Image (tube, rainbow, N blue to C red):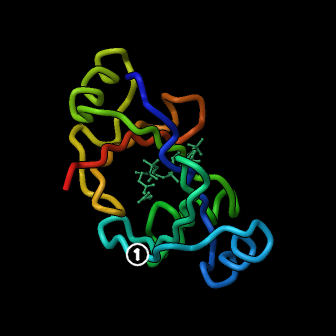
Amino acid sequence: MNPSHIEHIGIAVTSLEEAIPFYEKVLGLDCYRIEEVKSQKVKTAFFKVGQTKIELLEPTDPESPVAKFISKKGEGIHHIAFAVSNINRKLQEAEEKGVRLIDNVSRKGAEGMDIGFLHPKSTFGVLTELCEKKEE
Ligand code: CMX
């Protein structure tokens, strides 16, 4: 897999409006982007910490994965995303090694990245995302 770095940590929150001030006013980070990802039924807010980002996730639909996560486990760390190259080959390699995939092929996520998820039941309880930035 050889990820180059942790691209982002996804944190589920019920309200971006309520959560953003903690990251800005207490941690002193800058919210540089807010984006709705319709396919994932979330609104996201991004902060950079070195090479890694914090991605806050607010559900936009009560049936969305993030809404279900919050109602079951409460707000908190939702997933970890690793930056990889050749994402579709990496997803295939994970499957060949016995990992259950959520996405067999990558799809578009926030910031135009290609993303694919590994199932938390195969990854010791941590929803794991692979993501790849396509050159513009
Ligand atoms: N981390 C760890 N475990 C999780 C989890 C998460 N984020 N989300 C769900 N689970 C666990 C549940 O607790 C549950 O465990 P138990 O069976 O032990 O109770 C199990 O997975 C099944 O969960 P569920 O609530 O029944 O939900 P579904 O099976 O319908 O969906 C999952 C689970 C992971 C397949 C789904 O949430 C998914 O496809 N996630 C990937 C997409 C996503 O999360 N997108 C939002 C982020 C988008 C972005 O970054 O842009």
| Residue 87 percent across, percent down from the top left | 27, 35
Please, what secondary structure does the residue beneath circle 1 have? strand
| Residue 136 percent across, percent down from the top left | 19, 56
Q: Looking at the image, which is closer to me, 61 or 20? A: 20
Location of residue 84 with respect to 12 vertically, above or below: above
Q: Amino acid at mark 1?
A: Glu
Give the quadrant of residue 64: bottom left
| Residue 58 percent across, percent down from the top left | 54, 73
Residue at the outermost right position: 26
Location of residue 28 with respect to 92 vertically, above or below: below
- In the picture, the quarter occupied by the N terminus is top left
Residue at label 1? 35
Q: Looking at the image, which is closer to me, 31 or 45? A: 31
| Residue at the image position 57 percent from the left and 50 percent from the top | 9
Location of residue 8 with respect to 6 vertically, above or below: below
Q: Looking at the image, which is closer to me, 80 or 98? A: 80
| Residue at the image position 24 percent from the left and 45 percent from the top | 106
Residue at the outermost top position: 97
| Residue 119 percent across, percent down from the top left | 44, 37
In the image: residue 107, left or right of residue 22: left
Q: Looking at the image, which is closer to me, 53 or 126? A: 53
| Label 1, residues with CA under 10 Å away: few <14, some 14-19, many ≥20 | few
In the image: residue 132, left or right of residue 29: left
